[in-house]
Amino acid sequence: MTYTITTQPGDHQFSCEEGETLLDAALRQGLFMPYGCRSGSCGACKAKVLSGTFRYPEPKLNGLNRIDANSGDILLCQAEPCSDMQITAREIERAEDVEVKKLPCRVAGLRKLSHDVMQLLLSLPAYERMQFLPGQYLVFLLNDGRRRAFSIANAPDNDELLELHIRYVRDGDFTHHVFHDLKERDILRIEGPLGNFYLRHQLALPILFVAGGTGFAPIKAMIEQAILEKIQRPMTLYWGVQAKRDLYQLDLIESWIAKSSNFRFIPVLSNPEPEDNWQGRTGFVHEAVLQDIAQIAEYEVYASGPPVMVASAQEQFTEKGLPVEQFFSDPFDFAYDRPKRTRKAM
């Protein structure tokens, strides 16, 4: 059974399957609402029922003590609909609406994605979640006061683990620690989410993603979210790296192509190795975009990667007519991993 949930204000609608919580269904379809733990303990996802019926699978959760059932208040992270419903709930549409937290986390997994990129999975305390918009980043709070920032690489519908892609930097203290010393179950401290790099929905333009190196990470989160939402806008990913071995998670990208007929992928190598036998695009990734797309002004552009790449893309795209308000960026200033250097939130 599928139920239709209508939110006020805004008159937005989303579908919710039988046995699915209202919060899970909303997040799955790109409707972001405040929450704190997703376990029924904190009460942060409180909303009000205007019509319809629901049930709590576990009616004795601590968070239920914080709401007055007679007032019509419910916890979205626990309530499952038994009919079509109308609810009053606050919706998150801007990064400024998301709560920034400082939290301990545990290393849940370490896996090399390529010769110099590590996938780092982080788990949060049992009754905590970090709500974020796809494309935002977090920072590690190091013992000596330094901060190291990395984009969150997974979509927020599944936030039990936070996924990061960390490139090894020669002479970089933190990345050396990640690649050589960090172990599963180690404890770290993080702050987030931060940044204004996230997918917008105000325009109906085709979406152009331009990634350089591990700038793929936040764009991965955006694409995963867009596919979950079944966005029908054409989406094209240009991913620039040096050589073929720097392209990782290609099986994941192939799954996106299979799931979404409106998604295209164009890899671009700036310095392919002879053994690559590369027959695809070469050169700088932003220049490949301009070679292919004459009417760049008809796109909404999301660019992420080394600062020089992002700056060049913005300069050249706007020179070709792209309105500046249609260019969103996430330059990786922090990638150099030098002492007392942090990435600024944009």
Image (cartoon, rainbow, N blue to C red):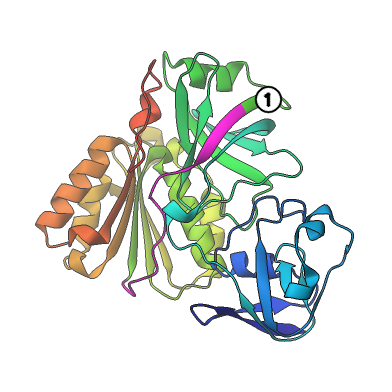
Q: How many marks?
A: 1
Q: Is residue 195 above or below residue 297?
A: above
Q: Is residue 223 magenta?
A: no
Task: Please give left or right for residue 125 compared with residue 179 in the image.
Answer: right
Taking depth in this image into account, of 337 and 125 the one nearest to the observer is: 125
- Residue 107: x and y in percent read 68, 30
Residue 244: tell me if it is visible. Answer: no
Name the residue rendered at 40%, 34% in the picture: 275
Disc 1 marks which residue? Answer: 187
Task: Please give left or right for residue 266 compared with residue 85 in the image.
Answer: left
Taking depth in this image into account, of 292 and 299 the one nearest to the observer is: 299
Q: Is residue 144 above or below residue 248?
A: above
Q: Residues within 10 Å of mark 1 (few under 14, many from 20)?
A: some
Which residue type carries mark 1? Ile
**Quarter holding residue 26:** bottom right
Task: Please give left or right for residue 201 compared with residue 20 in the image.
Answer: left
Name the residue rendered at 73%, 27% in the picture: 185
Name the residue rendered at 63%, 56% in the picture: 35
Task: Please give left or right for residue 266 compared with residue 5 in the image.
Answer: left
Q: Is residue 271 above or below residue 22?
A: above
**Quarter holding residue 311:** top left
Q: What's the magenta bit mostly, secondary-structure-wise?
A: loop
Quadrant showing the C terminus: top left
Query: From which residue to which does the magenta span run?
Result: 189-205
- Residue 210: x and y in percent read 33, 52
- Residue 199: x and y in percent read 41, 60
Taking depth in this image into account, of 83 and 185 the one nearest to the observer is: 83
Taking depth in this image into account, of 49 and 211 the one nearest to the observer is: 49
Name the residue rendered at 64%, 78% in the picture: 87
Quadrant showing the N terminus: bottom right
- Residue 259: x and y in percent read 56, 68
Q: Is residue 46 above or below residue 39?
A: below
